[in-house]
Amino acid sequence: MSGVFKAYDIRGVYPGELDEKLAYAVGFHFRAILDAEDIARGERVVVSHDMRSSSPPMADALCEGLRAAGLSVVHIGLATTPMNYFAIGHLATSGGIQVTASHNPAQYSGLKLSRRDAIPVSSDTGIATLETLVREQPVAPSPARAPIERLDIWAAYREHVLSFVRGREPRLKVAVDVANGMATLYRGLLEELNLDLVPLFFGLDGSFPNHEANPLKPENLRDLQNAVREKGCALGIAFDGDADRAILVDDRWEIVGADMVTALLARPILERYPGAAIVYDIRSSWVTREEILAAGGKPMRERVGHSFMKATMRRIDSPFGGELAGHFYYRENYFADSSLITAIEVLNVLRRAGKPLSELLAPLRRYACTGEVNFHVEDKAGMIRTLAKVFHDGAIDYLDGISVEYPDWWFNVRPSNTEPLLRLVMEARTRELLERGKERVLAILGRPEADDSRP
Protein backbone atom coordinates (compact mmCIF):
# COMPACT_ATOMS: atom_id res chain seq x y z
CA MET A 1 0.00 0.00 0.00
CA SER A 2 2.86 2.41 0.78
CA GLY A 3 3.60 2.60 -2.93
CA VAL A 4 0.62 4.90 -3.53
CA PHE A 5 1.18 7.20 -0.54
CA LYS A 6 3.73 9.63 -1.95
CA ALA A 7 5.56 12.65 -0.56
CA TYR A 8 3.00 15.17 -1.83
CA ASP A 9 -0.06 13.17 -2.87
CA ILE A 10 -1.63 9.72 -3.16
CA ARG A 11 -1.15 8.27 -6.63
CA GLY A 12 -1.15 4.89 -8.37
CA VAL A 13 -2.49 2.73 -11.17
CA TYR A 14 -6.27 2.35 -11.19
CA PRO A 15 -7.77 -0.01 -10.11
CA GLY A 16 -4.84 -2.28 -9.26
CA GLU A 17 -3.10 0.07 -6.81
CA LEU A 18 -5.70 2.75 -6.11
CA ASP A 19 -9.46 2.19 -6.23
CA GLU A 20 -12.82 3.34 -4.84
CA LYS A 21 -12.35 1.34 -1.63
CA LEU A 22 -9.12 3.16 -0.85
CA ALA A 23 -10.64 6.52 -1.86
CA TYR A 24 -13.52 5.88 0.58
CA ALA A 25 -11.05 5.03 3.35
CA VAL A 26 -8.98 8.17 2.71
CA GLY A 27 -12.16 10.24 2.84
CA PHE A 28 -13.25 8.59 6.07
CA HIS A 29 -9.89 9.15 7.79
CA PHE A 30 -9.28 12.64 6.35
CA ARG A 31 -10.83 14.23 9.43
CA ALA A 32 -8.01 12.81 11.57
CA ILE A 33 -5.38 15.03 9.90
CA LEU A 34 -7.37 18.26 10.27
CA ASP A 35 -6.55 20.50 13.22
CA ALA A 36 -8.87 22.59 15.38
CA GLU A 37 -8.54 25.65 13.14
CA ASP A 38 -9.41 23.57 10.08
CA ILE A 39 -12.49 22.13 11.79
CA ALA A 40 -13.53 25.61 12.95
CA ARG A 41 -14.11 26.49 9.28
CA GLY A 42 -17.34 24.52 9.40
CA GLU A 43 -16.34 20.90 8.80
CA ARG A 44 -16.75 21.23 5.04
CA VAL A 45 -14.44 19.76 2.39
CA VAL A 46 -14.20 20.73 -1.29
CA VAL A 47 -14.10 17.79 -3.71
CA SER A 48 -13.41 17.99 -7.44
CA HIS A 49 -11.94 15.78 -10.14
CA ASP A 50 -10.17 15.74 -13.49
CA MET A 51 -11.26 14.26 -16.84
CA ARG A 52 -10.00 10.67 -16.45
CA SER A 53 -12.66 7.98 -16.76
CA SER A 54 -11.74 6.71 -13.29
CA SER A 55 -12.10 10.11 -11.63
CA PRO A 56 -15.89 10.46 -11.19
CA PRO A 57 -16.30 7.08 -9.41
CA MET A 58 -13.21 7.81 -7.31
CA ALA A 59 -14.65 11.21 -6.36
CA ASP A 60 -18.01 9.65 -5.48
CA ALA A 61 -16.36 7.11 -3.18
CA LEU A 62 -14.24 9.81 -1.61
CA CYS A 63 -17.35 11.93 -0.92
CA GLU A 64 -19.10 9.00 0.72
CA GLY A 65 -16.14 8.40 3.01
CA LEU A 66 -15.96 12.06 4.02
CA ARG A 67 -19.70 12.19 4.73
CA ALA A 68 -19.62 8.96 6.71
CA ALA A 69 -17.00 10.59 8.96
CA GLY A 70 -19.25 13.60 9.50
CA LEU A 71 -17.61 16.03 7.07
CA SER A 72 -19.99 17.76 4.69
CA VAL A 73 -18.92 17.95 1.05
CA VAL A 74 -18.90 20.87 -1.37
CA HIS A 75 -18.63 19.07 -4.71
CA ILE A 76 -17.54 21.46 -7.48
CA GLY A 77 -17.36 18.71 -10.10
CA LEU A 78 -14.96 18.84 -13.05
CA ALA A 79 -12.19 21.29 -12.14
CA THR A 80 -8.49 22.02 -12.45
CA THR A 81 -6.34 21.60 -9.36
CA PRO A 82 -5.93 25.40 -9.04
CA MET A 83 -9.72 25.70 -9.08
CA ASN A 84 -9.85 23.26 -6.16
CA TYR A 85 -7.32 25.38 -4.25
CA PHE A 86 -9.29 28.53 -5.00
CA ALA A 87 -12.56 26.99 -3.85
CA ILE A 88 -11.02 25.98 -0.50
CA GLY A 89 -9.88 29.53 0.18
CA HIS A 90 -12.83 31.36 -1.38
CA LEU A 91 -15.44 29.25 0.43
CA ALA A 92 -13.41 29.16 3.68
CA THR A 93 -13.75 25.37 4.02
CA SER A 94 -11.85 23.01 6.31
CA GLY A 95 -9.92 21.57 3.36
CA GLY A 96 -10.23 20.02 -0.06
CA ILE A 97 -9.29 17.02 -2.18
CA GLN A 98 -8.73 16.96 -5.93
CA VAL A 99 -9.03 13.59 -7.68
CA THR A 100 -6.25 13.70 -10.28
CA ALA A 101 -3.09 11.94 -11.36
CA SER A 102 -1.72 15.19 -12.75
CA HIS A 103 0.65 14.51 -15.68
CA ASN A 104 0.73 10.72 -15.28
CA PRO A 105 -0.56 8.42 -18.05
CA ALA A 106 -4.22 7.49 -18.43
CA GLN A 107 -4.14 4.36 -16.25
CA TYR A 108 -3.28 6.37 -13.13
CA SER A 109 -5.52 7.96 -10.52
CA GLY A 110 -4.64 10.09 -7.54
CA LEU A 111 -5.67 12.39 -4.69
CA LYS A 112 -4.21 15.82 -3.88
CA LEU A 113 -5.12 16.87 -0.36
CA SER A 114 -5.26 20.30 1.26
CA ARG A 115 -6.29 21.78 4.58
CA ARG A 116 -7.85 25.22 5.14
CA ASP A 117 -6.69 28.05 2.86
CA ALA A 118 -5.25 25.45 0.46
CA ILE A 119 -2.45 24.49 2.87
CA PRO A 120 -0.97 21.36 1.28
CA VAL A 121 -0.93 17.99 2.99
CA SER A 122 2.40 16.22 2.51
CA SER A 123 3.88 13.03 3.90
CA ASP A 124 5.18 14.97 6.91
CA THR A 125 1.87 16.73 7.60
CA GLY A 126 -0.72 14.01 7.10
CA ILE A 127 -0.21 11.59 4.22
CA ALA A 128 1.92 9.22 6.33
CA THR A 129 -0.74 9.37 9.05
CA LEU A 130 -3.45 8.57 6.51
CA GLU A 131 -1.43 5.61 5.26
CA THR A 132 -1.21 4.20 8.79
CA LEU A 133 -4.91 4.75 9.45
CA VAL A 134 -6.00 3.21 6.16
CA ARG A 135 -3.78 0.18 6.77
CA GLU A 136 -4.50 -0.36 10.47
CA GLN A 137 -8.11 0.83 10.78
CA PRO A 138 -10.03 -0.52 7.77
CA VAL A 139 -13.56 0.83 7.42
CA ALA A 140 -16.69 -0.70 5.96
CA PRO A 141 -19.08 1.56 4.03
CA SER A 142 -21.67 3.09 6.31
CA PRO A 143 -24.58 5.52 5.82
CA ALA A 144 -23.52 9.09 5.15
CA ARG A 145 -24.10 11.39 8.13
CA ALA A 146 -23.18 14.75 6.58
CA PRO A 147 -24.74 16.60 3.63
CA ILE A 148 -23.34 17.12 0.14
CA GLU A 149 -23.74 20.33 -1.84
CA ARG A 150 -23.01 20.69 -5.55
CA LEU A 151 -21.67 24.11 -6.40
CA ASP A 152 -20.49 25.90 -9.53
CA ILE A 153 -17.55 28.17 -8.69
CA TRP A 154 -16.66 29.16 -12.25
CA ALA A 155 -17.95 32.76 -12.07
CA ALA A 156 -16.04 33.46 -8.87
CA TYR A 157 -12.89 31.82 -10.23
CA ARG A 158 -13.09 33.81 -13.46
CA GLU A 159 -13.38 37.09 -11.54
CA HIS A 160 -10.44 36.12 -9.33
CA VAL A 161 -8.11 35.20 -12.18
CA LEU A 162 -8.99 38.24 -14.28
CA SER A 163 -8.12 40.49 -11.33
CA PHE A 164 -4.46 39.81 -12.21
CA VAL A 165 -4.83 41.35 -15.70
CA ARG A 166 -3.13 44.73 -16.02
CA GLY A 167 -3.94 45.54 -19.63
CA ARG A 168 -5.28 43.79 -22.72
CA GLU A 169 -3.46 45.68 -25.45
CA PRO A 170 -1.90 45.02 -27.83
CA ARG A 171 -3.53 41.86 -29.10
CA LEU A 172 -1.04 38.97 -29.06
CA LYS A 173 -0.93 35.71 -30.95
CA VAL A 174 -0.37 32.89 -28.47
CA ALA A 175 -0.21 29.13 -29.01
CA VAL A 176 -1.61 27.06 -26.15
CA ASP A 177 -1.20 23.29 -25.79
CA VAL A 178 -3.44 21.75 -23.12
CA ALA A 179 -2.68 18.11 -24.09
CA ASN A 180 -6.39 17.20 -23.79
CA GLY A 181 -6.09 17.97 -20.09
CA MET A 182 -7.97 20.13 -17.63
CA ALA A 183 -6.72 23.46 -19.03
CA THR A 184 -9.30 22.83 -21.76
CA LEU A 185 -11.65 24.54 -19.30
CA TYR A 186 -9.61 27.73 -19.62
CA ARG A 187 -10.33 28.40 -23.28
CA GLY A 188 -12.99 31.02 -22.65
CA LEU A 189 -10.83 32.78 -20.08
CA LEU A 190 -7.86 32.80 -22.46
CA GLU A 191 -10.01 34.36 -25.18
CA GLU A 192 -11.03 37.10 -22.74
CA LEU A 193 -7.35 38.11 -22.56
CA ASN A 194 -7.53 39.58 -26.11
CA LEU A 195 -5.45 36.82 -27.66
CA ASP A 196 -5.29 35.54 -31.20
CA LEU A 197 -5.39 32.01 -29.83
CA VAL A 198 -3.70 29.11 -31.62
CA PRO A 199 -5.25 26.15 -29.76
CA LEU A 200 -3.59 22.75 -29.58
CA PHE A 201 -5.34 19.62 -28.33
CA PHE A 202 -8.26 21.24 -26.58
CA GLY A 203 -11.01 18.83 -25.62
CA LEU A 204 -11.02 16.71 -22.47
CA ASP A 205 -9.69 13.21 -23.08
CA GLY A 206 -8.11 11.29 -20.22
CA SER A 207 -6.49 8.85 -22.65
CA PHE A 208 -4.20 11.70 -23.85
CA PRO A 209 -4.39 10.71 -27.53
CA ASN A 210 -1.89 13.31 -28.81
CA HIS A 211 0.94 13.30 -26.29
CA GLU A 212 1.57 13.02 -22.55
CA ALA A 213 0.32 15.92 -20.46
CA ASN A 214 3.81 16.47 -19.02
CA PRO A 215 5.41 19.67 -20.38
CA LEU A 216 8.70 18.96 -18.59
CA LYS A 217 9.52 16.41 -21.29
CA PRO A 218 10.89 18.24 -24.34
CA GLU A 219 9.23 15.81 -26.74
CA ASN A 220 5.84 16.94 -25.42
CA LEU A 221 6.63 20.53 -26.43
CA ARG A 222 7.44 19.87 -30.08
CA ASP A 223 3.90 20.51 -31.33
CA LEU A 224 3.83 23.79 -29.41
CA GLN A 225 7.22 24.84 -30.75
CA ASN A 226 6.11 24.05 -34.30
CA ALA A 227 2.92 26.08 -33.84
CA VAL A 228 4.86 29.08 -32.49
CA ARG A 229 7.25 28.91 -35.44
CA GLU A 230 4.67 28.30 -38.16
CA LYS A 231 2.08 30.79 -36.91
CA GLY A 232 4.50 33.51 -35.81
CA CYS A 233 3.33 33.52 -32.20
CA ALA A 234 4.58 35.85 -29.50
CA LEU A 235 4.44 33.05 -26.96
CA GLY A 236 3.63 29.38 -26.46
CA ILE A 237 2.13 27.96 -23.26
CA ALA A 238 1.98 24.26 -22.35
CA PHE A 239 -0.18 23.12 -19.44
CA ASP A 240 0.09 19.81 -17.64
CA GLY A 241 -2.78 17.38 -17.05
CA ASP A 242 -4.39 19.02 -14.03
CA ALA A 243 -3.36 22.55 -15.10
CA ASP A 244 -1.32 23.50 -12.05
CA ARG A 245 1.92 23.82 -14.05
CA ALA A 246 2.88 25.78 -17.13
CA ILE A 247 6.01 25.74 -19.30
CA LEU A 248 6.63 28.50 -21.85
CA VAL A 249 8.11 28.62 -25.34
CA ASP A 250 9.35 32.02 -26.56
CA ASP A 251 8.81 33.68 -29.95
CA ARG A 252 11.91 31.96 -31.30
CA TRP A 253 10.33 28.67 -30.19
CA GLU A 254 12.98 28.10 -27.53
CA ILE A 255 11.86 26.41 -24.30
CA VAL A 256 11.94 28.81 -21.36
CA GLY A 257 13.23 27.42 -18.07
CA ALA A 258 10.80 28.01 -15.22
CA ASP A 259 13.57 29.68 -13.20
CA MET A 260 13.87 32.23 -16.01
CA VAL A 261 10.15 32.93 -15.62
CA THR A 262 10.62 33.47 -11.87
CA ALA A 263 13.44 35.90 -12.64
CA LEU A 264 11.37 37.66 -15.33
CA LEU A 265 8.35 38.15 -13.07
CA ALA A 266 10.33 39.16 -10.00
CA ARG A 267 10.78 42.77 -11.14
CA PRO A 268 7.12 43.68 -11.86
CA ILE A 269 5.95 41.88 -8.73
CA LEU A 270 8.53 43.73 -6.63
CA GLU A 271 7.34 46.99 -8.15
CA ARG A 272 3.96 46.22 -6.62
CA TYR A 273 5.44 44.93 -3.35
CA PRO A 274 8.74 46.81 -2.82
CA GLY A 275 11.35 45.05 -0.75
CA ALA A 276 9.38 41.82 -0.49
CA ALA A 277 10.91 38.35 -0.33
CA ILE A 278 10.64 36.14 -3.42
CA VAL A 279 10.96 32.39 -2.88
CA TYR A 280 12.64 30.05 -5.37
CA ASP A 281 13.77 26.43 -5.22
CA ILE A 282 17.37 25.33 -4.83
CA ARG A 283 17.61 24.15 -8.46
CA SER A 284 17.08 27.68 -9.80
CA SER A 285 19.73 29.59 -11.71
CA TRP A 286 22.00 32.19 -10.13
CA VAL A 287 20.04 34.58 -12.36
CA THR A 288 16.94 34.21 -10.17
CA ARG A 289 18.71 35.46 -7.06
CA GLU A 290 20.51 38.19 -8.98
CA GLU A 291 17.32 39.55 -10.56
CA ILE A 292 15.47 39.57 -7.22
CA LEU A 293 18.33 41.54 -5.64
CA ALA A 294 18.54 43.93 -8.61
CA ALA A 295 14.82 44.69 -8.20
CA GLY A 296 15.26 45.46 -4.51
CA GLY A 297 13.79 42.21 -3.22
CA LYS A 298 14.98 39.59 -0.78
CA PRO A 299 15.84 36.24 -2.40
CA MET A 300 14.70 33.25 -0.34
CA ARG A 301 16.03 29.83 -1.37
CA GLU A 302 13.90 26.83 -0.42
CA ARG A 303 13.70 23.04 -0.73
CA VAL A 304 12.04 21.49 -3.76
CA GLY A 305 8.35 20.73 -3.25
CA HIS A 306 5.15 22.73 -3.06
CA SER A 307 4.61 22.05 0.65
CA PHE A 308 7.99 23.60 1.52
CA MET A 309 7.57 26.52 -0.89
CA LYS A 310 4.09 27.40 0.34
CA ALA A 311 5.01 27.06 4.02
CA THR A 312 7.95 29.43 3.63
CA MET A 313 5.91 31.91 1.62
CA ARG A 314 3.25 31.97 4.35
CA ARG A 315 5.83 32.34 7.09
CA ILE A 316 7.52 35.36 5.50
CA ASP A 317 4.42 36.69 3.70
CA SER A 318 6.06 36.43 0.27
CA PRO A 319 3.95 37.62 -2.68
CA PHE A 320 5.48 35.23 -5.22
CA GLY A 321 7.51 32.06 -5.60
CA GLY A 322 8.59 29.77 -8.42
CA GLU A 323 9.88 26.23 -8.89
CA LEU A 324 11.86 24.72 -11.74
CA ALA A 325 9.08 22.18 -12.34
CA GLY A 326 6.75 24.94 -13.57
CA HIS A 327 4.85 25.67 -10.35
CA PHE A 328 4.37 29.38 -9.56
CA TYR A 329 2.79 30.56 -6.32
CA TYR A 330 0.95 33.78 -5.45
CA ARG A 331 0.05 35.25 -2.07
CA GLU A 332 -3.15 36.72 -3.53
CA ASN A 333 -4.07 33.19 -4.63
CA TYR A 334 -3.98 31.70 -1.12
CA PHE A 335 -0.24 31.08 -1.61
CA ALA A 336 -1.24 28.35 -4.08
CA ASP A 337 0.10 27.62 -7.55
CA SER A 338 -1.68 28.77 -10.68
CA SER A 339 -0.56 28.19 -14.25
CA LEU A 340 -3.23 30.54 -15.61
CA ILE A 341 -2.25 33.45 -13.35
CA THR A 342 1.36 32.88 -14.46
CA ALA A 343 0.30 33.09 -18.12
CA ILE A 344 -1.49 36.36 -17.34
CA GLU A 345 1.53 37.79 -15.51
CA VAL A 346 3.80 36.97 -18.47
CA LEU A 347 1.32 38.59 -20.86
CA ASN A 348 1.32 41.67 -18.60
CA VAL A 349 5.12 41.86 -18.93
CA LEU A 350 5.04 41.42 -22.72
CA ARG A 351 2.38 44.06 -23.24
CA ARG A 352 4.07 46.57 -20.98
CA ALA A 353 7.54 46.05 -22.48
CA GLY A 354 6.43 46.03 -26.11
CA LYS A 355 9.33 43.72 -26.90
CA PRO A 356 9.55 40.05 -27.94
CA LEU A 357 9.84 37.55 -25.11
CA SER A 358 13.16 36.27 -26.48
CA GLU A 359 14.58 39.81 -26.24
CA LEU A 360 13.42 40.15 -22.64
CA LEU A 361 14.94 36.77 -21.77
CA ALA A 362 18.26 37.24 -23.58
CA PRO A 363 20.04 39.01 -20.69
CA LEU A 364 18.72 36.38 -18.27
CA ARG A 365 20.17 33.47 -20.24
CA ARG A 366 23.68 34.29 -19.15
CA TYR A 367 24.79 30.98 -17.64
CA ALA A 368 25.09 27.40 -18.89
CA CYS A 369 22.98 24.76 -17.15
CA THR A 370 22.43 20.99 -17.34
CA GLY A 371 18.75 20.92 -16.41
CA GLU A 372 17.75 18.14 -14.02
CA VAL A 373 19.51 14.79 -14.62
CA ASN A 374 18.65 11.54 -12.79
CA PHE A 375 21.05 8.85 -11.56
CA HIS A 376 20.19 5.40 -10.19
CA VAL A 377 21.86 5.17 -6.77
CA GLU A 378 20.87 2.63 -4.11
CA ASP A 379 22.83 4.21 -1.23
CA LYS A 380 21.74 7.81 -1.68
CA ALA A 381 22.97 9.02 1.71
CA GLY A 382 26.34 7.37 1.17
CA MET A 383 26.73 8.99 -2.24
CA ILE A 384 25.96 12.42 -0.78
CA ARG A 385 28.65 11.87 1.86
CA THR A 386 31.10 10.95 -0.91
CA LEU A 387 30.27 14.13 -2.85
CA ALA A 388 30.79 16.19 0.30
CA LYS A 389 34.22 14.61 0.78
CA VAL A 390 35.35 15.05 -2.83
CA PHE A 391 34.09 18.65 -3.14
CA HIS A 392 35.04 19.74 0.39
CA ASP A 393 36.76 22.89 -0.92
CA GLY A 394 33.44 24.33 -2.14
CA ALA A 395 30.77 26.10 -0.11
CA ILE A 396 28.48 23.26 1.00
CA ASP A 397 24.96 23.26 2.39
CA TYR A 398 22.39 20.53 2.98
CA LEU A 399 19.10 22.39 2.58
CA ASP A 400 17.93 19.74 0.11
CA GLY A 401 20.40 16.96 -0.58
CA ILE A 402 23.78 18.61 -1.06
CA SER A 403 24.61 21.88 -2.79
CA VAL A 404 28.20 22.79 -3.59
CA GLU A 405 29.10 26.26 -4.84
CA TYR A 406 32.30 27.62 -6.35
CA PRO A 407 32.87 31.11 -7.77
CA ASP A 408 32.32 29.94 -11.36
CA TRP A 409 29.97 26.95 -11.02
CA TRP A 410 27.67 25.12 -8.64
CA PHE A 411 25.66 21.92 -8.41
CA ASN A 412 22.92 20.39 -6.32
CA VAL A 413 22.30 16.66 -5.87
CA ARG A 414 19.11 15.74 -4.04
CA PRO A 415 17.48 12.37 -3.37
CA SER A 416 14.14 11.26 -4.78
CA ASN A 417 11.55 10.77 -2.06
CA THR A 418 10.23 7.55 -3.56
CA GLU A 419 12.88 5.94 -5.80
CA PRO A 420 16.57 4.98 -5.67
CA LEU A 421 17.44 8.10 -7.65
CA LEU A 422 19.62 11.13 -7.13
CA ARG A 423 18.77 14.24 -9.16
CA LEU A 424 21.54 16.57 -10.34
CA VAL A 425 21.34 20.21 -11.44
CA MET A 426 24.51 22.08 -12.37
CA GLU A 427 25.23 25.59 -13.62
CA ALA A 428 28.38 27.43 -14.66
CA ARG A 429 29.44 30.78 -16.06
CA THR A 430 30.42 29.23 -19.39
CA ARG A 431 29.65 26.06 -21.32
CA GLU A 432 33.29 25.00 -21.03
CA LEU A 433 33.22 25.33 -17.24
CA LEU A 434 29.94 23.40 -17.15
CA GLU A 435 31.43 20.50 -19.09
CA ARG A 436 34.44 20.36 -16.80
CA GLY A 437 32.29 20.35 -13.69
CA LYS A 438 29.94 17.79 -15.18
CA GLU A 439 32.85 15.49 -15.96
CA ARG A 440 34.03 15.65 -12.34
CA VAL A 441 30.59 15.00 -10.83
CA LEU A 442 29.63 12.23 -13.29
CA ALA A 443 32.88 10.46 -12.47
CA ILE A 444 31.33 9.89 -9.04
CA LEU A 445 27.62 9.56 -9.83
CA GLY A 446 28.03 7.34 -12.88
CA ARG A 447 25.88 7.20 -15.98
CA PRO A 448 22.61 9.18 -16.01
CA GLU A 449 19.23 7.47 -16.20
CA ALA A 450 16.96 8.08 -19.17
CA ASP A 451 15.15 11.39 -18.69
CA ASP A 452 11.78 10.90 -16.99
CA SER A 453 11.21 14.61 -16.27
CA ARG A 454 9.21 14.11 -13.12
CA PRO A 455 8.51 17.17 -10.97
Image: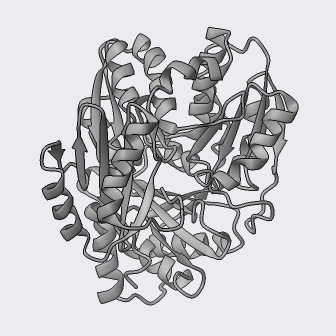
Q: Residue 432 in the image: x percent, y percent?
A: 42, 38
Residue 145 shows in the view? no
Colour convention of the picture: one colour
At x 36% / y 36%, what residue is drawn? 280
Residue at image coords 49%, 43%: 327
Question: What is the x, y in percent for residue 102?
Answer: 58, 60
Residue 296 seen in the figure: yes
- Location of the N terminus by quadrant is bottom left
Outermost residue on the right side: it is: 231
Q: In which image quadrant can residue 52 be found? A: bottom right
Residue name at image x 37 percent, y 50 percent: 438
In-front residue for pair 67/420: 420
Q: Which image quarter: residue 105?
A: bottom right
Residue 391 located left or right of residue 442 = left
Q: In the rendered image of this protein, does residue 417 appear above or below residue 350?
A: below
Classify 102 as above or below 410. Answer: below
State the residue at coordinates (24%, 31%): 407
User: Residue 157: image x %, image y %?
Assistant: 61, 37
Residue 91's spot in the image, x, y percent?
49, 43
**Vertical relation: 419 (above or below) 242:** below
